[in-house]
């Protein structure tokens, strides 16, 4: 006990210095936008690199159950889907600006990029996924993210030079426009906040005919995702008699605990509608 007291006395000044240094840095990064941005990017890079090393070891001991070549092949197939192209409207003369068009006058709308998952959480109130692909590889905020099976994973919320952070569907602020494939009724898909294998489809009219196992897909109302991607399948219905709508419990199309690779979706035609939305908000 005496030795501990002596140790504290000898290094007391040093401990006080470390405390106030940490406090001053915390205040600097929290209340200064520039320093906060620099800190966030550096932290993302460091976290990404450490997670990459850890993930590489885990990936090796799993004997690379996911085959890299199949992932690349899947990326190529996604980029050839007819749903990712749009036929140009030839009824009026149109000015084509910055969008590639082939000989059949068909525009590419969505482009897919594969990315390796280096960190993933599923047990927090707000879960994130970090992938080894960032701004240097063409990733931008608000890009949609899907799994190799085509199920929706989430949305990119932050990117550094070589890594990106994805807000998983298992997040309190996540919401995706979805619809029942069979009847076409639309609603909003959110997480139930408790179970990693339960999502909620909100605001479905009570006139809808819903059965267990029915598919819930993306509505196409968001510029992040193409229409028709799988969000999940119906588990059951929460019938609140005081409400005029149903809340439908659905099982996610993605196994969030087993993500090794994802595909980032770039909407090549998103700039114009996004600009229109900004102009409306500013009016």
Image (cartoon, rainbow, N blue to C red):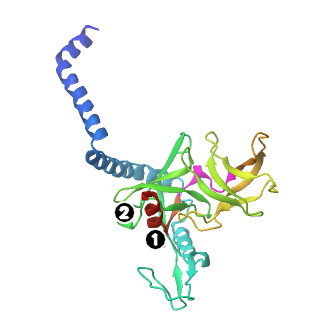
Say which quadrant the C terminus sits in: bottom left
Indicate the secondary structure of the residue bearing disc 2.
helix
In this rendered view, identify the residue nearer to me: 45 or 250.
250
Residue 120 part of the magenta-drawn span: no
**Residue bearing mark 1:** 272
Which residue is depicted at the point 63% across and 39% down?
194
Residue 93 is left or right of residue 26, and the answer is: right
In the picture as drawn, the residue positioned furthest to the bottom comes out as 103
**Residue bearing mark 2:** 135
Residue interval drawn in magenta: 251-260
Visible residue check, residue 120: no
In this rendered view, identify the residue nearer to me: 14 or 108.
108
Nearer the N terminus, badge 1 or badge 2? 2
Residue 241 picture location, percent across and down: 79, 40
Asked if marks 1 and 2 touch (Cβ < 8 Å), the reply is: no
Residue 256 part of the magenta-drawn span: yes
In this rendered view, identify the residue nearer to me: 65 or 149.
149
Determine the image quadrant of residue 6: top left
């Amino acid at each position: 006990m005496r030795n501990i007291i002596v140790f504290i006395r000898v290094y007391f000044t040093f401990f006080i210095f470390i405390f106030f240094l940490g406090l001053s840095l915390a205040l600097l990064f929290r209340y200064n936008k520039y320093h906060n941005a620099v800190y966030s990017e550096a932290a993302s890079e460091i976290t990404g690199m450490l997670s990459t090393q850890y993930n590489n070891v885990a990936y090796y001991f799993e004997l690379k159950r996911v085959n890299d070549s199949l992932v690349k092949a899947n990326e190529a197939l996604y980029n050839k889907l007819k749903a990712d192209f749009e036929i140009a409207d030839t009824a009026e003369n149109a000015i084509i600006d910055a969008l590639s068009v082939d000989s059949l006058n068909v525009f590419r709308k969505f482009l897919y990029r594969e990315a390796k998952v280096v960190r993933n959480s599923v047990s927090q109130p707000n879960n994130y996924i970090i992938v080894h692909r960032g701004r240097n590889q063409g990733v931008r905020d608000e890009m949609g993210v899907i799994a190799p099976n085509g199920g929706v994973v989430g949305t990119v919320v932050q990117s550094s030079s070589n890594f990106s952070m994805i807000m998983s569907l298992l997040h309190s602020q996540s919401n995706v426009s979805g619809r029942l494939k069979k009847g076409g009724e639309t609603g909003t898909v959110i997480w139930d906040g408790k179970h990693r294998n339960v999502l909620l489809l909100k605001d479905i009219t009570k006139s809808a005919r819903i059965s267990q196992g029915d598919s819930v897909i993306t509505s196409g109302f968001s510029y992040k995702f193409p229409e028709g991607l799988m969000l999940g399948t119906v588990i059951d219905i929460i019938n609140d008699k005081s409400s005029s709508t149903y809340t439908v419990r659905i099982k996610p199309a993605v196994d969030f605990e087993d993500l090794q690779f994802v595909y980032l979706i770039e909407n090549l035609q998103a700039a114009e509608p996004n600009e229109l939305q900004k102009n409306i908000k500013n009016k």
